[in-house]
Image (spheres, coloured by chain):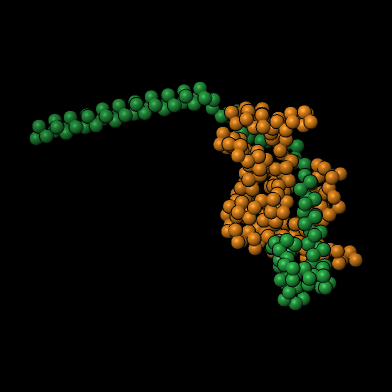
Amino acid sequence: MERERVESQQPRDLVDRARTGDRDAFGELVRIHQHEVFTLAVRLVRDRDLASDVTQDAFVRAWRAMPQFRGDAKFSTWLHRITVNTAWTHRTKRNRVRLDPLESLPSEPESAAIDPVRAGESASAAPSIEHALKGLSTSVRSVVVLKDIYDWSHAEIADHLDISVTAAKVRLHRGRKELRQILRGWKDGAE
Amino acid sequence: MNVRCVSISATLSSRGEDGLTDGMERHVESCLQCRREVVEHRELQRALVELKQVTYRAPAEIPFRVMDSIGPWSVPTHAEKRDHRTVVAAAAAVATAAATAAAGTAVLLLRHRQRAA
């Protein structure tokens, strides 16, 4: 119990030190949070290389914004928001220079692209749903990921993706429906 | 698929099972198509919840890339901020004095020209 308390306080202490410009403390925060930030980035941009760039850029932005972090939200929540904004910026830039949108990238087996940190914890349905998410357009997938995996509210999603709350709800509706259809197609194909 | 089935499918996608009315639930019990929709909805939600536990390993070089990118810059300490404020205040004072002197010189020159004329 005592150990749990001490461990949960460590990131708080690291955040406080990083806010005052302690690079080592921030480096430790990067090591602690890099996988979750990368995971969110992969789910948003669907491209390993781009997700790496988004992860790096998100941490750089976080470092610059550290003095403004007031601790109203959890550090990881704050980091997720920065990651979403960064992913959106990268996606916009990339779409500006590439004529083919991210949706047209060929999907590759998850195992070949990224290694789950906790493979043992990954349940049987998770890989198929992760794969099914790839079938959604970026705008729809982002809403489903943020709402159903990261528990964001419609208002938060709308705010960060610069869309209306109604649009967020419509995209969620469409995304869930498409996912059910994709999964049904796979199931019917297997039977 | 009738109108009620379409409505149930839409409700499941937008609000989940909580959004189903008593009438819809009664219909689900007697409709094979809608029962399948509900089962698939549950499976989907369960799978999405499971994804919360799955994390992907970031490339090993990420921490090094980040630390290289942020450079040696650090957030200024309180003393550094105070020193910075002092420098800015001194620069502002010098700028104000220079502007005043320039304005004074301009006025004197103007008067001198007016007298000469």
For the residue pair A177 and B66, the one nearer the viewer reads as: A177
The quadrant where residue A4 appears: top right
The quadrant where residue A53 appears: top right
Find residue A100 and report its horizontal and vertical position in percent. Answer: 66, 59
* Quadrant showing the N terminus of chain B: bottom right
* Whether residue A136 is visible: yes
In the depicted structure, whether residue B2 falls above or below residue B74:
below
Q: Which chain is green?
A: B
Write down the colour of chain A. orange
**Total label count?**
0
Side of A134 where A59 appears, left or right? left
Find residue A164 and report its horizontal and vertical position in percent. Answer: 58, 59
In the depicted structure, whether residue B16 falls above or below residue A152:
below
For the residue pair A68 and B95, the one nearer the viewer reads as: A68
Side of A55 where B88 appears, left or right? left
Query: What residue is rendered at 13% in x and 30% in y?
Result: B112
* Quadrant showing the C terminus of chain B: top left
In the depicted structure, whether residue A184 falls above or below residue A71:
below
Find residue B18 and report its horizontal and vertical position in percent. Answer: 73, 61
Single out the residue that lies furthest toward the right.
Answer: A191
For the residue pair B36 and B27, the one nearer the viewer reads as: B27
* Whether residue A100 is visible: no
